[in-house]
Amino acid sequence: MTRSKKGLEGAGEWHELKKLLPDFTGKKVLDLGCGYGWHCRYAVEQGAEKVIGIDLSERMIERAQAMTDSSKISYLLMSMEEIDTLNETFDIVISSLALHYVSSFDTIAKKVNDCLKPNGDFIFSSEHPIFSAQGTQEWIYDQNGQPLYWPVDRYFDESIRETSFLGEQVLKYHKTLTTYINGLLINGFQLTHLIEPMPAPEMLAANTEMRDELRRPMMLIVSAKKTTNQTN
């Protein structure tokens, strides 16, 4: 994928996500589902004092370690549900396109709240509920192979979806917009921004097929600030 080869600049949503990131200077950062570690390295480049990236993929962690030469970054093979075992508090928690792989956003929101310092920031991107609802994540095409429309079905059925990604079958958890937003609000967060990002203008200009991304939202970007401890 372009984002795997080019990093953050190859990610279609990066031009919007980076606008929401707070000042990293001297901060402790946790990256949930860090992948190749692009966001971890960016945080250190922007002045973060300590960064921990976690991921369930051993291959991703190994690749992130090979691409990183900063002693301020450490990578751990673990799930998001285990972050309470870190016994650390952070100024910033970020997550890029990983939360649709966990079954309960409410559980993660509670644990993030617990590990954030007062007024800490939680910024994440996920697949947009319109993108993930039907499950196959494929356009409906006409007889000439042109995309007719993006199917939306079973929107309120928050369950596992199986799709094909880079030649492999992948399981994801569809969640509604209500689940994401209320999951933050009832767990001690104040919503600060919500963005349904469009591809960057230069990407649209360089790739005509990218223009179909303007026909439906693919991603959701949310930023929130911890205001109180989680509710019980």
Image: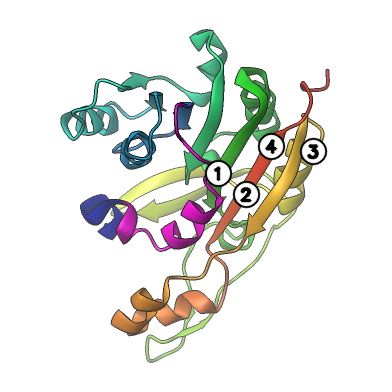
**How many residues crowd mark 4 within 10 Å: few (<14), some (14–19), many (20+)?**
many
User: In this figure, which residue is indicated by the disc labeled 3?
Assistant: 185
Secondary-structure class at tag 1: strand
Residue 154 sits in quarter = bottom right
Cα distance in 3D space between marks 2 and 3:
12 Å
Residue 192: x %, y % from top left: 70, 48
Are the residues tagged 4 and 2 within 8 Å (C-beta)?
Answer: no
Residue 216 image point, x, y percent: 57, 73
Rendered-image quadrant of the C terminus: top right
Q: Earlier in the sequence, mark 2 or mark 3?
A: 3
Mark found first going from the N terminus, 1 or 3: 1
In this rendering, position of residue 87 left or right of residue 178: left
154 vs 61, nearest the viewer: 61
The relative height of residue 195 versus residue 54 in the rendered view (above or below) is: below
Report the residue at 61% width, 35% height from top.
Answer: 121
What residue type is disc 1 on?
A: Phe
Indicate the secondary structure of the residue bearing disc 4: strand
